Image: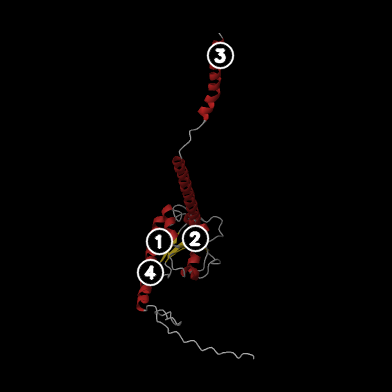
Amino acid sequence: MQRLTHFATFLLFLAITAIICVPYASAAEPQKPDDAKKAEDAKKKADDAKKKAEDAKKKAEEAAKRADEPKNWSSRDASQTRSAESAIVLYIKDPKPKKNLEAEHYESKDCLLDDSLRVKLRGCSRIKIKSDGTDGRGWAPEWLQKAHNGAMLVLLTSDGSQVYQFEAKGKEGPKADAISQAADRILKWQTERKAAADAKAKAEAAKNPPPPPPKPEIPGLDGKTVAKKPDKPKVKEPQDE
């Protein structure tokens, strides 16, 4: 009887131990090998870096789109703009009318905000000035006059050899395709001009090579052995007797 009691007590102890230990055993996570953990950390870092790059690219594109809007273009004088040696897109607008239908047309997706055109014009110097010329000096007076009470658009090369003018009447005006074709012409001309200037500069440099470097004036630096000068004889100083 006593043995049965001890056996029953032993079984009860095992049961209680199982009840206590099983939850802890099931909750504990198996330890991952070091290599697997390192690989997981490396993947996480790579994913984080990729996300940061995507976010930076998205922010840059958003900033570029804001810069594409004509209202955000800078105002500059004609001489300053032409010295940049790039194709020019000049948008002239009269700010006085409360309802400027022509400006609304130019600043719409049918015109300057067309997805394809806005990207192409990033290769140009995009300038916006008032029709009274107060924020941009040196532009043709007839262009300013045509934009009076409305707006107009001019595409031109840096030297003014090619000029394309676009005028609107109310909301009826030039479409993005027509402006894009003009942009192609001035961008091509500007690229060819730069290539010709670079080739000319290279040819001039070949005709006039730089002079050889000056020979060193310090003895011994030109590779020649310099004879050692004999030491002067020492003069004995008189000694006090």
Secondary structure of residue under mark 4: helix
Secondary structure of residue under mark 3: helix
Q: Position of residue 199 (x, y in %)?
A: 35, 71
Q: Nearer the viewer, residue 71 or 105?
A: 71
Q: Position of residue 218 (x, y in %)?
A: 46, 82
Above or below, 71 relative to 211: above
Provide the residue designation for mark 2.
151
What's the amino acid at mark 4? Answer: Arg
Q: Nearer the viewer, residue 41 or 56?
A: 41
Q: Quadrant of residue 118?
A: bottom left
Residue drawn 43% across and 61% down? Answer: 123
Q: Residue furthest front?
A: 241
Label placed on residue 193: 4
Residue drawn 41% across and 54% down? Answer: 116
Q: CA distance from mark 2 to mark 4?
A: 30 Å
Q: Quadrant of the C terminus?
A: bottom right
Q: Of the residues tagged 3 and 2, which is closer to the observer?
A: 3
Q: Position of residue 187 (x, y in %)?
A: 39, 63
Q: Nearer the viewer, residue 106 or 192?
A: 192
Label placed on residue 183: 1
Q: CA distance from mark 3 to mark 1?
A: 100 Å
Q: Nearer the viewer, residue 76 or 48?
A: 48
What's the amino acid at mark 3? Answer: His
Type of colouring: secondary structure
Provide the residue designation for mark 3.
6
Q: Position of residue 64 (x, y in %)?
A: 48, 55
